[in-house]
């Protein structure tokens, strides 16, 4: 099942994603992420969080339309997005796209990236998605679907990543190590398809810009 989660970014505009949002098998608003949905008259299947950021009129509209409201205490240990991700997995999602995860507060944005490493997500394909870029975590192997000329950065997450081998990228890596505190993996380019990345240990964050060489 494909789930879409809308995180609470103050600058996120849901309109360009309207068709995708309406077709989602499971649409979850992580607290204030529901405001962007309310602005384009889309009702999520679930709204989750302490609901301190969701506008009262949006909450009333969602509830009246049959949206499932999952309210948590304000003094919880998890962010609203973490709760939404764990709920999506519990409801059977195998693919999860998160919109509105970046932008606004730096602490929230960095935390949202780190959430990709949740052990509960290891069996899912999870992306942070925007109109012109995506980010996702590789734990062993993944193809990189995109156009020749697209920019791809490989960023080790949580420490060094070892045994990295790439195919179809301009600057190849062959059983290489990328260090968390170094920038070696930034700004590679897709030269052939299918491009791919594999690694022996660690985790690598792929940041893929849909720029086709621009």
Image (cartoon, rainbow, N blue to C red):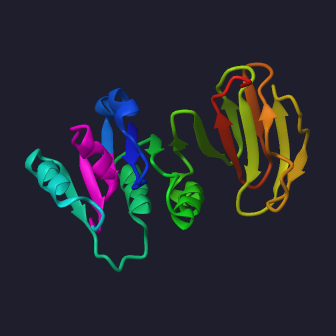
Quarter the N terminus occupies: top left
Q: Position of residue 155 (x, y in %)?
A: 75, 50
Quick check: is 42 in the magenta stretch? yes
Quarter of the rendering containing residue 55: bottom left
**Residue 212 in view:** yes
Near-viewer residue (51 or 73): 51
Q: Which residues are magenta?
A: 28-51
Q: Position of residue 193 (x, y in %)?
A: 74, 19
Q: How many marks?
A: 0
Quarter of the rendering containing residue 37: top left
- Residue at image position (68%, 43%) is 206
Q: Position of residue 33 (x, y in %)?
A: 34, 52
Please state if 129 lies on the left or on the right of 149 as rendered.
left
Quick check: is 39 in the magenta stretch? yes
- Residue at image position (52%, 44%) is 124
Please state if 53 lies on the left or on the right of 212 as rendered.
left
Quarter the C terminus occupies: top right
- Residue at image position (61%, 44%) is 136
Q: Where is 193 relative to 181, above or below?
A: above
Quarter of the rendering containing residue 17: top left
- Residue at image position (11%, 44%) is 65
Near-viewer residue (76 or 109): 109
**Residue 44 in view:** no
Near-viewer residue (99 or 195): 99
């Amino acid at each position: 099942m494909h789930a879409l989660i809308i995180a609470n970014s103050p600058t996120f505009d849901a309109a360009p994603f309207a068709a995708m949002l309406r077709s989602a098998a499971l649409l979850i608003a992580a607290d204030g992420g529901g405001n962007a949905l309310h602005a384009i008259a889309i009702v999520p299947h679930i709204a989750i969080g302490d609901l301190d950021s969701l506008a009262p009129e949006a909450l009333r509209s969602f509830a009246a339309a049959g949206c499932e409201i999952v309210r948590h205490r304000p003094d919880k240990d998890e962010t609203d997005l973490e709760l939404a991700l764990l709920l999506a997995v519990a409801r059977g999602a195998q693919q999860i796209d998160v919109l509105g995860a970046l932008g606004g507060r730096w602490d929230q944005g960095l935390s949202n990236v780190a959430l990709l490493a949740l052990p509960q997500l290891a069996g899912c394909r999870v992306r942070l998605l925007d109109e012109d870029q995506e980010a996702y975590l590789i734990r062993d192997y993944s193809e990189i679907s995109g156009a020749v000329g697209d920019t791809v950065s490989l960023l080790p997450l949580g420490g060094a990543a070892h045994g990295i081998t790439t195919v179809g990228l301009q600057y190849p890596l062959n059983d290489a190590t990328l260090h968390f505190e170094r920038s070696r993996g930034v700004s590679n380019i897709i030269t052939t398809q299918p491009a791919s990345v594999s690694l022996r240990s660690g985790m690598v964050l792929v940041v893929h810009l849909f720029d086709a060489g621009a």
